Amino acid sequence: MVWMDTNRDWLGWVGAGSLLMLVLSLLIVPVLVVKMQPDYFLETRDEQKSMKERHPALRFIGKFLKNLGGGILVISGILLSLPLIPGQGLLTVLIGLAVMDFPGKRRLELWLVKLGPVHWAIKKLRAKADQPPLVLPAD
């Protein structure tokens, strides 16, 4: 109890941050999952070429910001996966990974999306929004 009394401000900030992550994950993650293209995980999917036609400096800045945002989502998702912290942790991690660019990304995304609870949640969210289910490659 002494520790809690001496760290009351810190605990307040952690509690406020946890509440903010909960609200943001409940608002943003379902929208991103519903807007994801059904063929996102297929190898034949057309890659967006919008950034490839931009100036190299703009591409660098865009990739940096994209990876920064994805990293923030991954870290938030990991925190939301901890016990006693409410929120959609694994879905938030999946969205963060989908945003980022790094070697081995596809294999990690597929592993995550095929986890039972994650796959069930994605299927349920997409069905509720009248979106087709995600098409996953056969192993």
Image (spheres, helix red, strand yellow):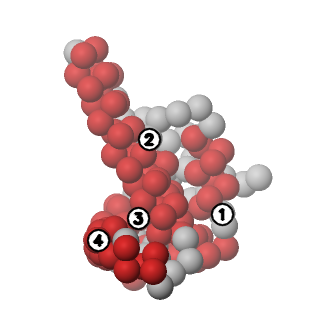
Quickly name the residue at label 1: 114
What numbered label is drawn on residue 35?
none
Q: Residue at x 29, y 36 (%)?
A: 65
Mark 4 or mark 3: whose residue is earlier in sequence: 4
Circle 2 sits in a helix, a strand or a loop, which is it? loop
Give the residue number, with chain letter if any, for mark 2: 100
Crowd class of label 3 (few under 14; some 14 to 19; many from 20; radius 10 Å): many
User: Tags 4 and 3 in contact by the CB under 8 Å rule?
Assistant: no
Earlier-in-chain disc, 3 versus 2? 3
Q: Amino acid at mark 1?
A: Lys
Q: What is the CA distance from the residue labelled 1 to the residue labelled 4?
A: 40 Å
Cα–Cα gap, marks 1 and 3: 14 Å
- Counting residues from the start of the chain, the first of labels 1 and 3 encountered is 3
The span from disc 2 to disc 4 (Cα, nearest Å) is 34 Å
Do the residues bearing badges 3 and 2 touch, measured as CB atoms within 8 Å? no
Q: Which residue is mark 3?
A: 33
Residue at the top extreme of this rendering: 56
Amino acid type of disc 2? Met
2 or 4: tag closer to the N-terminus: 4
Q: Are marks 1 and 3 in contact (CB under 8 Å)?
A: no
Q: Can residue 32 be seen in the rendering of this structure?
A: yes
| SS assignment at label 1 | loop
Tell me, for residue 9, which label it has, or none.
Answer: 4
Going 49% across and 48% down the picture, which residue do you hit?
97
Task: Name the secondary structure under disc 4.
Answer: helix
